[in-house]
Image (spheres, rainbow, N blue to C red):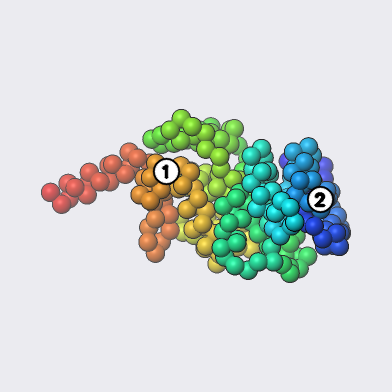
Amino acid sequence: MHKGKVRILVVDDEPRYVRAVQVNLEASGYQVLTALDGQTAIELAAGEAPDLILLDIRMPGLDGYEVCQRIREFSTVPIIMLTALAEDADKVRGLDMGADDYVTKPFSADELLARVRAALRRVELSERPAPHPTFRAGDLLVDFVQQRVFACGQEVDLTPTEYRLLCELVKQAGRVLVPEYLLEKVWGVGYEGENHLVWQAIHRLRRKIEPDPRNPQYIKTRPGLGYVFVPPEQGTAAQERAQNRTA
């Protein structure tokens, strides 16, 4: 993150709306960059490297989904989607494109600032050094120092939220983590009860790191409880113990 003022890129095709958000952010001490279209947003994201992006979904030309996808090709900057759409399918699509969060219009200045603070806190936490430089389980490697993930020798492109979720799971491998705990640790304060965010992120993470996402070998679901990261050797040992008990 930049030293000094945190820089936030606000992207929306409505100038009055951009100005209103800009005033609130600047009053809270943030430096604001603005873009009224998708192409300008992509150029600013690449050239100015903002610390966070507020990105409207419905824009002419390149919409927010496309802009998010393009930015994810070169940056892991936190992206909060601004949407007037209340449909879960639209929110899921934004998260699938690589967004970290979304705020549904109309929203209050306090709600938006709370989401911004939460996203920036998550970045600060993820930048703290891990107790061990790497974690390896089977064909999966997590490099905490470089914040990179490899599966079967190939680097996996994770969003910041997906990376933080995986880190939380592998650091507590073998322990069942309930959705409420993961929401607090990965998303932060203010996400109580939004268990669907955890389910969606787990689903996306499995698609990226599991050899067979429909039959996951690493991230297991414990019905009614939560999720647990099971290293292959632990899974094998547990199966052997179960077989011995039934023999």
In the rendered image, residue 114, in percent from the top left (x then y), is placed at: 71, 60
Secondary structure at badge 2 equals strand
Q: Do the residues labelled 2 and 1 touch (CB within 8 Å)?
A: no
Left or right of residue 215: residue 60: right
- Foreground: 233 or 87? 87
Position of residue 245 in the picture relative to residue 128 (left or right): left
- Is residue 184 visible to us here? no
- Residue 35 tag number: 2
Residue in the image at 79% along x and 45% along y: 40
In the foreground, 124 or 55: 55
Secondary structure type for disc 1: loop
Q: Quadrant of residue 75?
A: top right
At which x and y percent is residue 145? 58, 33
The circle drawn on residue 210 is: 1
Location of residue 205 with respect to 91 vertically, above or below? above
Which amino acid type corresponds to the residue marked 1 in the rendered image? Glu
